[in-house]
Image (cartoon, grey):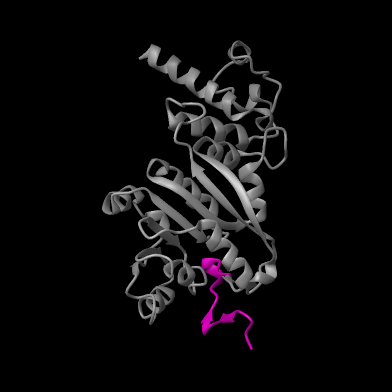
Amino acid sequence: MNNRVHQGHVARKRFGQNFLKDQYIIDSIVSAINPRKDQAIIEIGPGLGALTEPVANLVDQLTVIELDRDLAHRLARHPFLQEKLTIYQQDAMTIDFHQLSTHYDKPLRIFGNLPYNISTPLMFHLFLYADVISDMHFMLQKEVVNRLVAAPNSKTYGRLSVMAQYYCQIMPIIEVPPQAFQPAPKVDSAVVRLIPHKTLPWKVNDMTLFSQIVTQAFTQRRKTLRNSLEHHLTTEQLHSLDIDPSLRAENISLEQYAKIANWLSEQRTNIN
């Protein structure tokens, strides 16, 4: 028997499908999400409904976003769920979550077992809607969770750490072994809670510029800042911001990246 078949569905490699089957883990995740009837709850990648069913039991209405046409069709015909579900059969990267929040007239609570191959770009997409999201609970590769919470001066600290921590408070809550899935992935997983900041710890004036600076620094993370950011500011200018030009990207805190971006933004404003 093909071990990729689960509940009559063949897991599709191109969608990064691994279906959750461990009931204890499922119950723990639903308990952590703690869905309520009067909330706008969105599931990304419901798959075979391992989380969809227990969450739907606790609410009157649930919106799900599923790219796989067969799985979306399966959910639409589900004997218990079909009355409660609003199904978007499309890529979550194409969803305007501001429109969804306006539709429900309330902030969104988002959860999902995210396919490993799209988890990082999808989180970057969701950060753009942080102002209308109250919280997010995601199953991710454990290595991605480690990067989300990493502090400066560690090898796992990178662009994802800086950008995620700018937008959200991040808490790992459940570790999940490979055997909790069918088929079992080759990596450990973990569930993480992301709560968008109501008040940003450090306000950035130009998010595009901030993102460029962080990306540029970590794209050349082995270089010192004087080299990786040489097209943006000089060694002397870094010194004037109390930032050591001989440090590398992984040594710079979120606050310092914000400081660099805001200083550059002011310089451009003054020139214009």
Q: Is residue 196 above or below residue 44?
A: above
Picture quarter with the C terminus: top left
- Front residue (pair 244, 220): 244
- Front residue (pair 130, 1): 130
Residue 261: % across, % down: 50, 24
Q: Is residue 153 magenta?
A: no
Picture quarter with the N terminus: bottom right
Which residue appears at 55% of the width and 36% of the height? 215
Residue 167: % across, % down: 49, 38
Give the magenta-colored segment's residue range. 1-18
Number of numbered discs on residues: 0
Which residue appears at 65% of the width and 25% of the height? 225
Residue 171: % across, % down: 60, 46
Q: Is residue 9 magenta?
A: yes
Q: Is residue 97 above or below residue 52?
A: above
Tell me which secondary structure the magenta stretch mostly adopts. Answer: loop
- Front residue (pair 24, 43): 24
Report if residue 63 is visible in the image.
yes
